Amino acid sequence: MIGPRSAARRAVGLAVCTVFLRGATVAAAAGRPVTLAAADGVTLAGQLYETAARPAPGVVLLHMLSRTRGDWDEVAQQLEAAGLTVLAIDLRGHGASGGSAASLSGMVPDVRAAVQWLSARPTVRPDAVGLVGASLGANLALLAAAEQPLVRAVAVISPSLDYRGLRVSADVMKKLSGRAVWLAASSEDPFSLRTLKELTADESMPRDQQLSSVAAHGTNLLTADKDLTRALVDWLRQRLLF
């Protein structure tokens, strides 16, 4: 016979397990895995977060070096809730994607392939596609968008003037003239701060900037500074939803 205390403990245990399992189910349901082909045939892995409102603006998210698309999960869910469909990809040689990460410049065509894949979906508005990148992903986003007029808005966190040969400059910014660009960095990150100043030096092409007092870099900055994350989500909503 099970006593009252044992029964109570068992009930509590079952309740805890139920909550845990429900939480695990929710976590596992954040987006769904997809694959797409790069121009050279390499398979790229991604996570697709489809908003209920369709057709919707689309956003491609690009992670930092040696990281994966999972770094974007929280931001992607917020964007999805805000009415945008999101594709976070593993860059080649990272996560579940094929290929090698030896050539960073070889990732630029992969970004273009991701933008084309997302914009071609019937649930996405091809006239409202954005690119977001952090650190390495920031440089990739700027370089890919500069050669892809389809991209309407670009947001970058902690960019570098020269990320291991991936150089961004005033010429790259000129190619983005007429399109929305948002640049963010920590005020405690001297190199990224210098990059922001140089990329926004031309006052004839005003850009949106956001500085954070939190000492962090890339997606780590978004994780540590929730106000910056909210600013990013709000900016993308304003630039792509209307």
Image (cartoon, rainbow, N blue to C red):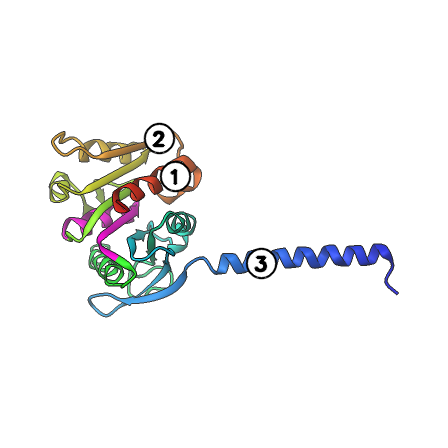
Mark 1 and mark 3: span between their CA atoms?
Answer: 27 Å
State the residue position of label 1: 230
Is residue 40 in view? yes
Which numbered disc, 3 or 2, marks the residue closer to the eye? 3
Q: Is residue 72 above or below residue 206?
A: below
Tell me where residue 70 appears, x and y as whole percent: 41, 54
Q: Element type at marker 1?
A: helix
Whether 10 is among the magenta residues is no
Tell me where residue 178 appears, x and y as whole percent: 14, 41
Is residue 68 in view? no
Q: Answer with left or right where residue 229 lies relative to residue 240.
A: right
State the residue position of label 3: 22
- Name the mark on residue 188: 2
Instruction: Name the amino acid, label 2.
Output: Glu
N-terminal of the pair, mark 2 or mark 1, is 2
Instruction: Name the amino acid, label 3.
Output: Arg
Assess disc 3: are there few (<14), some (14-19) or many (≥20) residues with their C-alpha within 10 Å of its C-alpha.
few
Q: Is residue 167 above or below residue 192?
A: below
Mark 3 and mark 2: span between their CA atoms?
Answer: 40 Å
The part of the image, by quadrant, that contains residue 182 is top left
The part of the image, by quadrant, that contains residue 218 is top left
Q: Answer with left or right where residue 177 lies relative to residue 106.
A: left
Quarter of the picture containing the N terminus is bottom right
Instruction: Name the amino acid, label 1.
Output: Arg
Q: Element type at marker 3?
A: helix
The part of the image, by quadrant, that contains residue 104 is bottom left
Quarter of the picture containing the C terminus is top left
Assess disc 2: are there few (<14), some (14-19) or many (≥20) residues with their C-alpha within 10 Å of its C-alpha.
some
Range of residues picked out in magenta? 125-147
Tell me where residue 113 appears, x and y as whole percent: 22, 61
Q: Element type at marker 2?
A: loop
**Do labels 1 and 3 touch, CB within 8 Å?**
no
